[in-house]
Structures are given as C-alpha cells and as structure tokens.
Amino acid sequence: EAQVTQNPRYLITVTGKKLTVTCSQNMNHEYMSWYRQDPGLGLRQIYYSMNVEVTDKGDVPEGYKVSRKEKRNFPLILESPSPNQTSLYFCASSLFTPQGGLTDTQYFGPGTRLTVL
Amino acid sequence: SQKIEQNSEALNIQEGKTATLTCNYTNYSPAYLQWYRQDPGRGPVFLLLIRENEKEKRKERLKVTFDTTLKQSLFHITASQPADSATYLCALDPADRGSTLGRLYFGRGTQLTVWP
C-alpha cells in the first residue's frame, strides 16, 4: 500500500528540547515536503526536497532543519523548539521532475500534532 | 499578504446541486495548480492537477478549470452529496515554467457543507 508515515503522531515537549519528527514514504518518490497547518493561516510549506541531498526552503523555514540522506526518509528537526512552533505538521511526497514539478498525486502523511510548552 | 485567495471560507449547498469553489492568485504565472480535499484532523487528499496549457480537467463528478488570463481556477462538484462535505484547498507552484519548481503555496481553503 502506498503510504507516507510520520512519527510520532502526538508530541508534547518543552521549550528548547531538541526533537525530530520522522517521515518515510514507500513509493520511491523524488519529492518530499514538510508543512505546518495553523488555524486561520492554512497550510504552509516549511522545507521541501526534490531528491536525495537536494533541499530548499519553503515559506516558513525559520527554526527548522531537514536532511535527505535517503530517498525514502525526510526527517524534520527542531533544534530548540519554541511555543510558536506548536502546530499540526504534515509530511508529503510526490513524483517530481525539475521541469514539470509535481507530476502526479502528492500523498500526505497522517500528521503530527506538536505542542511546545 | 495572502498569496492565494479562496474567496469563500464556507459554502453551503443542497444535495444534488453543483458546488463551485474559486481560487484566485495575483503575482504568479504558475506552471500548474492542484486541488485537495481535507477532512478534520486528517491530511489533505489530492484530487486534481491542472497545467497552464490545460483549460479544463475532469475526474468523475469533479471538474477543474484554469484561466491564466484571469489568474483563477474554478473547482466544480456536480451532483453533490453530503459525503462531499469537507474543506477544499487549492495549491500552486509560484515558479514560472522554465524555472526550478517545487515550492507550493496553499490557499486557506473553503469549507463545503452539503445538506440533504
């Protein structure tokens, strides 16, 4: 079954304690992306990756890091979380070409609800 | 400022009617535009992608149009059903064709309610 998995699904942490949210896809997709969704602000892109070792900033990259060492995994790292990073986070993946962009369905994971106290 | 406008936060229609949702943008010449459905607490589900050289695309009861002159996309659900009730999002890559693609901007969504 084609899927994007995220872990953990729920996380409550404290300010400044480094955390990693994992994302994995089993569809051999080139493209992976992280989004955050906040009430009234909608879905905003944090970082995206067009292939292994190729990443770029989205709309709201401040306070986040990513890496793409393998095609299937795209972890999101919060080095020093702050309360304004409390949000619902989604990982997604898609087939992709540099000239055509997302060429097909973008599959989203189930989401990670993060609370930073 | 909002990059993409979905001009109705909420739309209520009667079962069997056609729902029409609007997505407007201003400062871009996107190579393509996407539509998604999102249910509460769930990740968005991809519905349709339409490219700049396509005027219209259909999938079962769904139809999307893309007018690059008006900078607008319309999303239609014909013969709507209560099960179509959800939030619908549009998204576009702001880069021109010929530029490196991959960034995505989402609208804030339109919450559709179909009542029996």
Image (spheres, coloured by chain):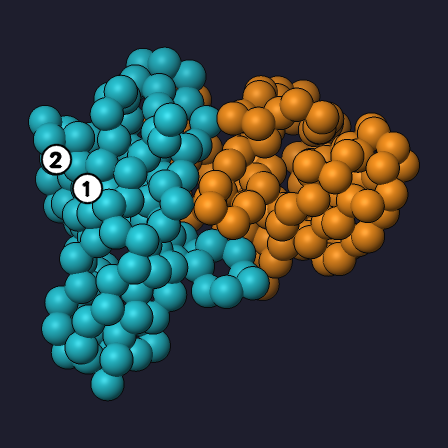
B112 and A98: which is toward the camera: B112
Disc 1 marks which residue?
A: B73
Q: CA distance from mark 1 to mark 2?
A: 6 Å
Instruction: Give the side of residue B53 with respect to residue B11, left or right.
Output: left
Give coordinates of residue A102: x percent, y percent: 41, 35
A111 and A2: which is toward the camera: A111
Q: Report the amino acid beneath label 2.
A: Asp
Residue at left 48%, top 41%? A41
Q: Quadrant of residue A29?
A: top right
Q: Quadrant of residue A2?
A: bottom right
Circle 1: is it few (<14), some (14-19), or many (20+) Cα within 10 Å? many
Q: Residue furthest bottom?
A: B116
Q: Is residue B99 above or below residue A35?
A: above
A84 and B40: which is toward the camera: A84
Give coordinates of residue A35: x percent, y percent: 57, 40
Judging from the image, what secondary structure is the residue with disc 1 in? strand
Question: What hue does chain B carry in this figure?
Answer: cyan
Instruction: Give the side of residue A81 with respect to residue A50, left or right.
Output: right
Q: Quadrant of the C terminus of chain A?
A: top right
Q: Which one of the lettered chains is coloured orange? A: A
Judging from the image, what secondary structure is the residue with disc 2 in? strand
Q: Quadrant of the N terminus of chain A?
A: bottom right
Residue at left 36%, top 14%? B99
Disc 2 marks which residue?
A: B67
